[in-house]
Image (tube, rainbow, N blue to C red):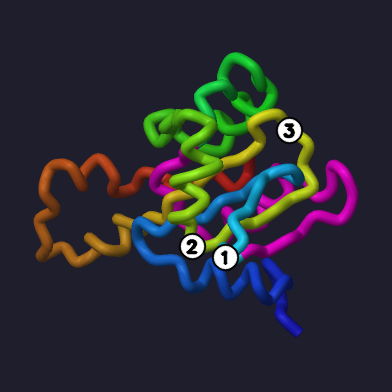
Amino acid sequence: MKRSGIINDALARAIAAMGHGDLLMIVDAGFPIPRDADRIDLSIVAGEPGLDLVYRAISADLIVEKIHFAEEVPVHNKPMFETLKRWFDERDFETVPHDSLLGDFARRAKTIVRTGALDPWGNIVLRSGVDYTQYFADPRLDPPEPFRGLIDRPPFRRDA
């Protein structure tokens, strides 16, 4: 038996398959997942599991370089926005029209994870990143300026 972390085999496999720039969506119970999408349905009952629990599990294994969410969230779902600010550096935020989450992002996502969450606009897109500290660990490398700000910057927050 696996010692720790995610024990859902489909979710563990999906995270292991993520590459730099791939998209993973965590969506609420009502999200219209495209028929041909790689879907992992974790929902049990209304509200369970919530976005918070699912993200906490995923964050231990996935490096996130950008988070996309509906532009309505900061105004119309302040509790979710506060949670996102605890999890991520706001420099990594990109608000998008809600319709683009339902359309373009859902079609491009490598995997869509359905939760039982009942949060208005409760859908986030995680763009997979890399650990720049490890990539530039060799002291013989001279990272260009845009990468210097990414080195030693925590790519996500697990303890929030």
Tell me which numbered mark, 2 or 1, is placed earlier along the sequence: 1
Tell me which numbered mark, 3 or 2, is placed earlier along the sequence: 2
Amino acid under label 1? Asp
Work out whether 11 lies above or below 129: below
* Between 21 and 30, the one nearer to me in the picture: 30
Do the residues bearing badges 3 and 2 touch, measured as CB atoms within 8 Å? Answer: no
Residue 146 in the figure: left or right of residue 53: left
Amino acid under label 3? Asp
Q: x, y (%) of residue 51? A: 70, 44
Give the residue pinned by disc 3: 119
Q: The residue tagged with tag 3: helix, strand or loop?
A: loop
Q: Residue furthest right?
A: 45
Q: CA distance from mark 3 to mark 1?
A: 24 Å
Q: Residue furthest bottom?
A: 1
**Start and end of the magenta stretch?**
39-68
Q: Residue furthest front?
A: 35
- Number of disc labels: 3
User: At 87% from the left edge and 44% from the top edge, which residue is drawn?
Assistant: 46
Amino acid under label 2? Lys
Tell me if residue 57 is in the magenta stretch: yes
Tell me if residue 146 is in the magenta stretch: no
Give the residue pinned by disc 1: 36
Q: Residue furthest top?
A: 75
* Between 159 and 9, the one nearer to me in the picture: 9
Give the residue pinned by disc 2: 110
User: At 61% from the left edge and 40% from the top edge, which residue is drawn?
Assistant: 123
Q: The residue tagged with tag 1: helix, strand or loop?
A: loop
Within 10 Å of disc 3 (Cα), the crowding (few <14, some 14-19, many 20+) is some
Q: CA distance from mark 2 to mark 1?
A: 11 Å
* Between 53 and 35, the one nearer to me in the picture: 35
Q: The residue tagged with tag 2: helix, strand or loop?
A: loop
